[in-house]
Image: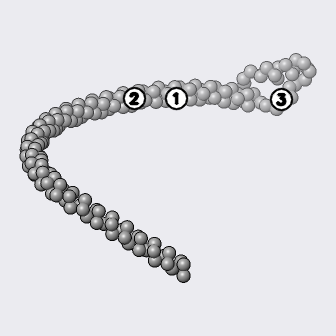
Amino acid sequence: MSAMPEESLREIAATNEPPHTLASPEFFFLLQRIDRLDEKLTREIRDGDQKSEELITAVEQKLTQRIDAVEQKLTQRIDAVEQKLTQRIDVVEQKLTRHIEEVEQKLTQRIDEVEQKLTQRIDAVDQKLTRRMDAMEEKLGLRIDKQDDKLNSLKFWAIGAVITISVGFIGTIATLLYK
């Protein structure tokens, strides 16, 4: 038989009567067994929890390392592609710049040639027109002088006709007013 629990011994000492415990020594034995099992189970759960955390940390480290390696590879590939594209763009830009400069030079030469030709033609036309205008001016000057003489005589005749007609109308109006 196992030892009596402390509670029972205290109760006997206090009352001098047999203990009135509800639990038997076997029950206390079972309680002790349950306590030990509980401690063992708690310890195993803690150990399992710790192992799980260690495994999770190890997996997390491995995944982080793999992600870092993939990220590094992708960064290197992106940098390489960016460098190639930059080089290609620079080459294309240089070719286009050269081509534009050549076209600009050709156009400038052609414009200069056309400008020279047009300037020469305009100067020739200007000289011809100036000569013709001078000749026309001279002819018109002579004609105007002749016409001036005719015009003066025509002016006097027209003024006389206007005065005669005006006096006639005034006379007619005056006659009509007196009647």
Coloration mode = one colour
Sequence order check: which comes first, mark 3 or mark 1?
3
Residue at image position (41%, 70%) is 166
The residue identified by callout 1 is 48
The residue under the point 41% across, 74% down is 168
Q: Is residue 55 visible?
A: no
Furthest residue to the top? 13
Asked whether 128 or 61 is in front, the reply is 128
Compared to residue 8, the image places residue 104 above or below, namely below
Q: Is residue 59 left or right of residue 48?
A: left
From the top left corner, tell me how far across and down residue 66 is, in percent.
Answer: 35, 30
Residue 43: percent from left, percent from top: 58, 25
In-front residue for pair 119/62 = 119
Residue 64: which disc? Answer: 2
Q: Earlier in the sequence, mark 2 or mark 1?
A: 1
- Residue 21: mark: 3
Q: Residue furthest bottom?
A: 179
